[in-house]
Image (cartoon, helix red, strand yellow):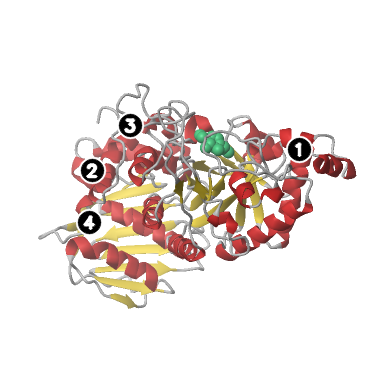
Amino acid sequence: MKARTITGCIFLLALLSGHWSWLHAGIDIIPCPSQVQVGDGCFSVASDTAILVCGPCQEQGRYFADMLRSASGYELAVTAADMDQAAANRIMLHLDSSRSDIGREAYHLLVDSKGVMLTASTNAGLFYGLQTLRQLLPPEIESDKPIAGIKLDIPYITIADSPRFAWRGLHLDVSRHIFPVEFIKKYIDLMARYKLNTFHWHLTDDQGWRIEIKKYPLLTAIGSQRSESPLSATPDKGDSIPYGGYYTQKEIQEIVAYAGSRFITVVPEIEMPGHAVAALAAYPELGCTGGPYKVWTRWGVNSEVFCAGKDQTFTFLEDVLAEVLELFPSPVIHIGGDECPKDSWKKCPQCQQRMKDNALADEHALQSYFITRIEKYLNSQGRQIIGWDEILEGGLAPNAMVMSWRGIAGGIAAARQEHSVVMSPTSHCYLDYCQARDRTGEPPCWGGYLPLEQVYSYEPVPQELTSEQARWIIGVQGNLWTEFIATPAQAEYMAYPRAIALAEVAWSKPEHKSLARFLDSLKMQLKRLDMIGVNYRKPEGK
Ligand code: TNX
């Protein structure tokens, strides 16, 4: 095999233009792998190709066989076997936990005349290798119906690949609008294709409580229903149409398991102390005035929040979190912490008393007390908290992680205090922001202008940090807030293809990024998304 060592895809593109262009259809891998060597020739998967698995990775073998089945009609046998490198016409999956040279989510892939040899030290690594393999197969592989005479050619190639960041996130707000379980699974499937590994599920907010909590049935009986929603053209007016819904614990378990088998951690977000009106509508005694409150029918920031002066607020939240922990194995739990107006605390004698008793200088310190108290509980249960960057105000809870959204200053401050940070600034990561300057013909959207190219250009590690401090930046995340996104089709339109750009930001080494190569490879990805019915937005001029 003639092989050329190429570091990253920029060089690959150079080689592929001209003489090597025949390979192009096969090599459009996004996110761009760390190292690629391309050979001359192709291995063709046939109906008698064997999938050989070694170690406890039967499941990965079956996953790949399933991936090939619908388009080809092949029922490839998955067999536990010793890794005999000499065997031919085989796809070998080798889980070798002793390979300390292959990182936790990394993989090595070799495709040559004998077939495929995929090696990883974890099942996650194998899974990512299979996603790469999928992208090396022709886009017809995505068909859900058999294609007569389909050619399953995989170019000869050697890839060594590993992610840049540990937290590669995509968020979905299901409070402002709720989405069906089937759609959540599709959202997760798409994430997995692009090696994203963290699904941040925003389950509660002013406009709807969406998670069943057995101990507090009114959270869903009352808190999941609002009397109307804002009109998208005139959000200060309502549409007079009741809206609601929630996920049962059974559905949540199903989604968490589904994500888990795709190596995606589901991080639930239970908002506190602000964005809590839906919970207050159900249990008004948890607010400072005692209500009554109504599940909010407008967007924005509501001044009614959980009362920080009452002990029953904390009892309630700990009870809720206890059920959340049963459902979500995630080591990290998102507690919100954003946009909490302090008006009601200022007027509340119990909050003022709490401040006095604990020598808290102001209401920001009271918010810090609130978050720290919740952190203590979650830490005692073996979990860590993450919160929006407002949790820095009044002092960061000792073990908290920070999600920097109002720009990057919060992320910088937290990293300097040696706290882990996920970068998610509105400027580059807010997928609810508009994709066109001219909004004619665009669905309603929120906020500023955030084109695909700008998402792609994002560098999550701020230059202001020393290399020591930069280690605290553990990842990056795209957020999909749904005030203006009412349907699955619209959610896909806003998320894709920008989420693919974000996936490359999260996975690929910065020196391997190239907008030209990305946009070129994206064409083949979009073909695949067409085949699986994703309502993405067509990139400008394409
Ligand atoms: C700010 S991001 C919010 C959300 C909104 C979003 C709209 C954050 C922590 N809070 O409540 O939905 O802006 O872009």
- Give the labeled residue for mark 4: 141
The image quadrant of residue 274 is: top right
First of labels 4, 2 by sequence position = 2
| Disc 2 from disc 1: Cα separation | 61 Å
Rendered view: 115 above or below 372? below
**Residue 345, label in figure:** 1
Locate residue 521 relative to residue 215 in the image: left or right.
Answer: left
Rounded to the nearest angstrom, the CA distance separating label 3 from label 2 is: 14 Å
Q: Nearer the viewer, residue 315 or 430?
A: 315
Question: Is residue 45 left or right of 261 when viewed as pictured?
Answer: left
CA separation in Å, label 4 and label 2: 17 Å
Packing grade of label 4 (10 A; few <14, some 14-19, many >=20) is: many
Mark 3 nearby-residue class (10 Å; few <14, some 14–19, many ≥20): few
Identify the disc placed on residue 516: 3
Q: Quadrant of the C terminus?
A: top left
Instruction: Please provide percent x and percent y for residue 403.
Output: 60, 41
* Three-letter code for the amino acid on which mark 1 is drawn: Trp
> Circle 2 sits on which residue?
24
Label placed on residue 464: none
Amino acid beneath label 2: His
Q: CA distance from mark 3 to mark 4?
A: 25 Å
Helix, strand or loop at mark 2: helix
- Give ligand 1's quarter of the image: top right
Q: Residue furthest top?
A: 438
